Image (tube, grey):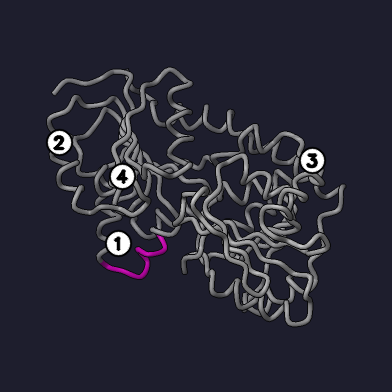
Amino acid sequence: MGRDKRTVRLVAPRRSPHTYTWMRAFRSRGWEPELVSLTSGGRAVSWWLLPWRALSGRFSPRPAVTVFQSMGAHGLLGALLPRSQRSVVVPWGSEVQAARRSRWRSWIGGFILRRADIALVTSHDMAETLRTLWPASAPEVMVISWGVSEAALRRHDHAAARHTVEAEATVDHDATVVLAPRGVGSVYRHPVVLEAFRRARSTRLDLHLLVIDTRRTDVTDYESSDTDGVTILPMQPRSEFHTLLAGVDCVVSIPAADQRSTAVLEAIAIGARVLLSDIAVYRELRVDGADVDILGEPVLEALTLAFRSIKPMSPAAREANQQWARTHERESIQFDRIVMACTKGVR
């Protein structure tokens, strides 16, 4: 089949907010994005769609650029589709971590990388990991953070946001509120977050934990649960998520592996105190100038102690983090670089 000169095929989860960000970024810069996905109404991958999507791609016009988001199911689909002029893989940290533990996942990762012209990662640690795990397969690797949206970078009314959090999440007025925004899966060590919170709350009853269940997307039909100071919320629209970040005292993210997470960057930009696991990508943030709290190991004990001693960011520290994000992590500038990297040499 012929090629569509200005079309970018994005192979990615349909309901992911990251997918919308990438689609919008290409469209606003004069490209025509089309989405190929293995998810439909929900967020779970439908593996039976993979051979059908791969086969139908052979009878469709080839786009100028293909971007496969992840080195899991969507990365595999992207690698099986006919080659574009330029193919780009965007690895996710959790899937690279899984490849360390599984020979099968490692082989799949190598196959995906061999089908790409470039790998875009958001941290230098991830770039080095790709080169180390797949020395014979890794293509050119470029490090570009996805940055923070203008909506997150604007000045937020923290008092008003706090009132909203108290009203909508049944939080007491004098509570110290912690947000775990990354989901309830083991990849983000959710059981450790819960156990540390419960230990800390035994001596500090003002603590309240908000957990976003990223598997659930229907806000209107979702009934939040509140047990022993823990409230489970569904995945939030971006504006509501920013209100949460502005209205809590602290944000926690302690995966064993990650990249430069958008949720973490937004928490920094909006001015929450951020508790992070002691991994290379998070240490990079502090080296780059962000004021974040890196927890030592064992992480359960370190997080428990951090919960017991949480204090909100001082106005000066909050302003410094906001200025750091505006200077280094502006989404519009970062996606100028991303789109240029994805479309380099395409005519």
Q: Specify which label sits upstream in the sequence, 4 or 2.
A: 4
Q: Which residues are magenta?
A: 96-103
User: Which type of secondary structure does the marked residue at label 2 adopt?
Assistant: helix
| Residue 144 belongs to the span the image colors magenta | no
Please name whichever residue, 20 or 259, is drawn nearer the observer in this view of the structure: 20
Q: Specify which label sits upstream in the sequence, 1 or 2.
A: 2
Crowd rating for badge 2 (residues with CA inside 10 Å; few <14, some 14–19, many 20+): few
**Mark 3 — residue?**
157
Please name whichever residue, 200 or 42, is drawn nearer the observer in this view of the structure: 42
Which of labels 1 and 2 is toward the front? 2
Q: Which mark is residue 179?
A: none
Locate residue 288 relative to residue 155 in the image: left or right.
left
**Mark 4 — residue?**
40
Locate residue 221 relative to residue 276 in the image: left or right.
left
Three-letter code, disc 2: Ser
User: Which type of secondary structure does the marked residue at label 1 adopt?
Assistant: helix
Q: In the rendered image, which quarter is residue 296 located in?
A: bottom right
Q: Specify which label sits upstream in the sequence, 3 or 1.
A: 1
Q: Is residue 110 above or below residue 319?
A: below
**Mark 2 — residue?**
56
Q: Which mark is residue 106?
A: 1
User: Which type of secondary structure does the marked residue at label 4 adopt?
Assistant: loop
Which of labels 1 and 4 is toward the front? 4
Which of labels 4 and 2 is toward the front? 4
Quadrant assignment for the N terminus: top left
